[in-house]
């Protein structure tokens, strides 16, 4: 007895509704609300003209390649020293996330050195730092080693050695400043000041909104993030900020889609107030992106001048008459924290689910091959030879669909992350990727329902499966079932689109 198409359609529809319900009901939910308007950020004054006065960066300089011993490796850097007489203020550049190279700071380091500031740019460590493990305190120690090196230089004023940190460096530099009074001042550029997980979730949500991505794509990403077990993602910046006593200069670009600059500013002020530190200057740079450039090109107008005039004017510039000034920052949504995934959706369980599904998919084709290799006569003895081959073909197609779904989800998440990191991307690519992922999930569901129906019908028609055939059927149907439940949790069956 064959199952009719109407019955199969109803069965598939019911399973689809059940799986969609799983995506709606199970936690965690992530829906960042609009950020409430803060009157302080509605009427920010323009920068004082003294901060923007032209800087003549033409002094001759000397460049030195240095290598300093650190924990587990040596740190190589480039020192730039003005040849003008006397002691000069000094600045150490601290990288953002990734494999930071000293060359990314060359334009700023050259400009500052020719304007009278000793600069140090060094390659980020590779030992003890990777995608999964990040010890901000270890990175802070590296920066302090550079500070100690500069303190011994005769060209450097030891009371005016500062640290400059961008992005991830905004979590590192306050730790170093809290650890050592040798740090004379702090410059923060695009510093998050909220947890890495909140910052990444906000950046992804902001970029997905710009790319007109479906809400389901955001939910897929945030649920995946909630299951990631990287401890550094929930780092709390407040303890270090609340111990920073040094003068602070902070820059935020109003076109930066990576940093929730309003909440980052609020977090910075909160920490400094707790430290009793009123010597802070926060500047919002018009059209500035994450690196204080305009669309990745030239530096935003006034950035280099403000930076140079503030450093060379210390200690007088430490106490600004205007704590906040510049262009008006507009942040649409809160930087909400991504809830931690429940135990059944954590990274360990997800990995176990994928491994079990993979084992089932491997066991299915292998078992089917064993059945074929045992010979046609034995197939007839164990089953009806006309019933098993169609089922075997279904199992093979299901295994390929399941593997295709896994590959497409990984590729889609990678695409979204790259679009967010590079602050680029095209909305048709996002929609096309989401369509492929969801169609494969629905196809896998249909294949599961029809394969179960076909196997049940074959049993009714007299098929007597052997041991290896049981292994083949159980492996592929079980593996697909696990993937269907996982896909439901990650919202691949949710409605609307």
Image (spheres, rainbow, N blue to C red):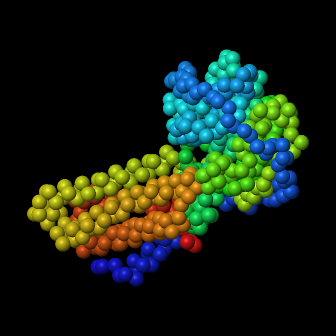
Q: Position of residue 250 (x, y in %)?
A: 75, 42
Q: Position of residue 313 (x, y in %)?
A: 81, 33
What is the residue that sits farthest to the right in this orientation? 321
Q: How many marks are shown on the rendered structure? A: 0
User: Residue 440 occupies which quadrant of the picture?
Assistant: bottom left
Q: Is residue 349 above or below residue 480?
A: above
User: Residue 102 occupies which quadrant of the picture?
Assistant: top right
Q: Is residue 112 above or below residue 466?
A: above
**Residue depicted at 45% across the width and 78% down the height:** 10
Nearest to the observer: residue 418 or residue 486: 418
User: Residue 139 occupies which quadrant of the picture?
Assistant: top right
Nearest to the observer: residue 138 or residue 181: 181
Q: Is residue 317 above or below residue 65?
A: below
Nearest to the observer: residue 62 or residue 404: 62
**Residue depicted at 66% across the width and 25% down the height:** 83
**Residue depicted at 62% across the width and 64% down the height:** 210
Q: Position of residue 370 (x, y in %)?
A: 19, 55
Q: Is residue 46 above or below residue 164?
A: below
Q: Is residue 260 visible to the viewer in this orientation of the structure? A: no
Q: Is residue 455 visible to the viewer in this orientation of the structure? A: yes
Nearest to the observer: residue 471 or residue 301: 301
The N terminus - image quarter:
bottom left
The answer to whether residue 395 is left or right of residue 12 is: left
Q: Position of residue 493 (x, y in %)?
A: 51, 67
**Residue depicted at 70% across the width and 30% down the height:** 117
The C terminus - image quarter:
bottom right
């Amino acid at each position: 007895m064959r199952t009719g198409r109407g019955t199969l359609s109803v069965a598939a529809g019911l399973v689809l509704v059940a799986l969609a319900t799983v995506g709606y009901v199970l936690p965690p939910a992530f829906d960042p609300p609009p950020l409430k308007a803060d009157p302080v950020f509605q009427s920010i004054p323009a920068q004082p003209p003294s901060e923007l006065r032209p800087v003549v960066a033409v002094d001759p300089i000397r460049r030195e390649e240095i290598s300093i011993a650190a924990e587990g490796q040596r740190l190589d850097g480039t020192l730039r020293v003005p040849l003008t007489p006397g002691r000069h203020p000094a600045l150490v550049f601290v990288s953002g996330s990734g494999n930071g190279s000293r060359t990314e700071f060359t334009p700023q380091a050259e400009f500052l050195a020719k304007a009278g500031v000793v600069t140090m740019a060094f390659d980020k460590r590779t030992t003890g730092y990777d995608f999964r493990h990040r010890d901000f305190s270890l990175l802070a120690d590296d920066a302090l080693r550079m500070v100690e090196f500069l303190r011994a230089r005769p060209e450097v004023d030891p009371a005016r050695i500062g640290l400059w940190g961008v992005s991830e460096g905004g979590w590192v530099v306050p730790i170093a400043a809290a650890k050592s009074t040798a740090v004379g001042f702090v410059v923060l550029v695009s510093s998050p000041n909220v947890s890495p997980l909140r910052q990444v979730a906000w950046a992804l949500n902001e970029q997905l909104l710009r790319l007109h991505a479906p809400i389901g794509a955001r939910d897929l990403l945030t649920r995946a993030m909630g299951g990631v077990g990287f401890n550094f993602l929930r780092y709390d910046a407040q303890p270090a900020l609340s111990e920073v006593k040094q003068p602070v200069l902070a820059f935020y670009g109003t076109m930066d889609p990576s940093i929730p600059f309003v909440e980052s500013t609020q977090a910075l002020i909160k920490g400094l107030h707790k430290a009793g530190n009123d010597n802070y200057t926060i500047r919002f740079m018009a059209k500035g992106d994450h690196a204080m450039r305009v669309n990745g090109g030239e530096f935003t107008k006034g950035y280099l001048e403000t930076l140079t005039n503030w450093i060379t004017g210390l200690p007088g510039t430490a106490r600004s008459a205007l704590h906040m000034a510049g262009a008006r920052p507009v942040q649409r949504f809160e930087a909400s924290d991504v809830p931690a995934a429940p135990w059944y959706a954590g990274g360990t369980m997800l990995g176990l689910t994928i491994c079990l599904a993979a084992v089932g998919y491997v066991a299915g084709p292998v078992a089917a091959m064993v059945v074929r290799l045992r010979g046609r006569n034995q197939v007839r003895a164990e089953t009806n030879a006309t019933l098993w081959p169609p089922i075997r073909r279904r199992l093979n197609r299901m295994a390929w669909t399941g593997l295709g779904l896994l590959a497409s989800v990984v590729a889609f998440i990678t695409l979204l992350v790259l679009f967010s990191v590079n602050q680029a991307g095209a909305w048709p690519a996002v929609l096309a990727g989401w369509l492929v992922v969801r169609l494969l999930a629905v196809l896998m569901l249909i294949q599961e329902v029809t394969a179960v129906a076909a196997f049940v019908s074959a049993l009714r028609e007299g098929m007597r499966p052997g041991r290896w055939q049981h292994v083949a059927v159980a492996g592929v149907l079980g593996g697909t079932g696990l993937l269907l439940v996982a896909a439901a949790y990650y919202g691949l069956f949710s409605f609307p689109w």
